[in-house]
Each structure stands twice: as C-alpha cells, then as structure tokens.
Amino acid sequence: MLTRGKLSKLTGCNAETIRYYETTGLLKEPQRSPSGYRIYNEEHVKSLKFIQRAKDLGFSTARIRSFLELSGERALHTRAEVKQLTEQHIQEVTKKIRDLTKLKKSLSQISSHCDGSGQTAESCPILVSLFDEI
C-alpha cells in the first residue's frame, strides 16, 4: 500500500503528474483509506511505469490510453492492433525527423552568414534574415 508521495518517489513521477493521470483516467483511481487518503498498489506502480515508458518513447496521451485499453482486455484485442498503433507512431516520428532535418538545414544556412564578430547585433545577418522572413 502506497501513498501518492511514496508512489512518486518509487517511480520518479511527479505527484501532480500522478494526479493529472488520475483525473484524465489514464491511471485508475486508487482506493481510499478510512481517513480518505489515496492508497496505491502494485498495479498502479506497473501502470505508471508503463505510462512513463510510453511517454519517453513519444507516444501521445491518447495513444497511451489506447495501449492501456488494448492491454486491459487481452482476449478482445490482437497484436495487430498494437502493431498498427506503433506503426502510426513510427510514421509520425519519421515525419518529425524530416521536419527537424529541414529546420536544422535552414538554421545552419542562416548561421553561416554571420561571422560571429564583435560588431553590433543590429546588422547581424541572422537577425536580418529572421526579420525578412516575417
């Protein structure tokens, strides 16, 4: 039996984040002690670690919710459904990588025009190009 504070320390997840996950239904609401304190169990620890790992991999809250739903009713869902969600995420990550690569190239081009000297920043080619792009 764990309090929110102990669950937070055990998992490294902020107590307010745990509260948010409960509020949004991502984490099952815990039982309460006779005095009204939330009491978490090993299932909460496992779910919270799952959520954290999925967040680390860049999955959205909605997609994490879908994974939790798929894992909760094992007999009703297939691996194909899990794989499909993961493949969709891979496509999104691939697009983000392409976009970030384009962004890096643009920034490198802008940066290459500045000599980094001690001249006033007002005429810096980086600032000039940023104002020109508006």
Image: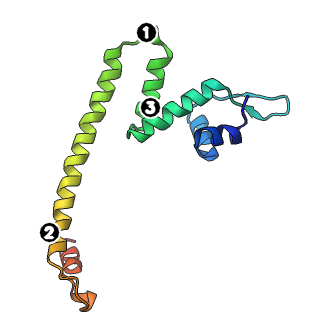
Residue 91 seen from this side: yes
> What is the basis of the colouring in this image?
rainbow
Q: Quadrant of residue 19?
A: top right
Instruction: Looking at the picture, tell me which residue is in the foreground, 28 or 57.
Output: 57
Separation of residues labelled 2 and 3 (CA atoms): 38 Å
Name the secondary structure under disc 1. helix
Label 2 packing within 10 angstroms: few (<14), some (14-19), many (20+)? few
* Residue type beneath disc 3: Ile
Please give left or right for residue 23 compared with residue 108 in the image: right
The residue that disc 2 covers is: 109
Residue 127, position in %: x, y?
24, 79
Q: Is residue 77 above or below residue 95?
A: above
Q: Is residue 128 above or below residue 9?
A: below
Residue 1, position in %: x, y?
73, 28
Separation of residues labelled 1 and 2 (CA atoms): 52 Å
Please give left or right for residue 43 compared with residue 74 in the image: right
Q: Is residue 39 above or below residue 105?
A: above
Separation of residues labelled 3 and 1 (CA atoms): 18 Å
Reading the chain from its start, which is encountered first: label 2 or label 3? 3
The residue that disc 3 covers is: 64
Marks 1 and 3: in contact by CB < 8 Å?
no
The residue that disc 1 covers is: 76
Name the secondary structure under disc 3. helix
Question: Which residue occupies 36% across, 12% down?
Answer: 78
Label 1 packing within 10 angstroms: few (<14), some (14-19), many (20+)? few
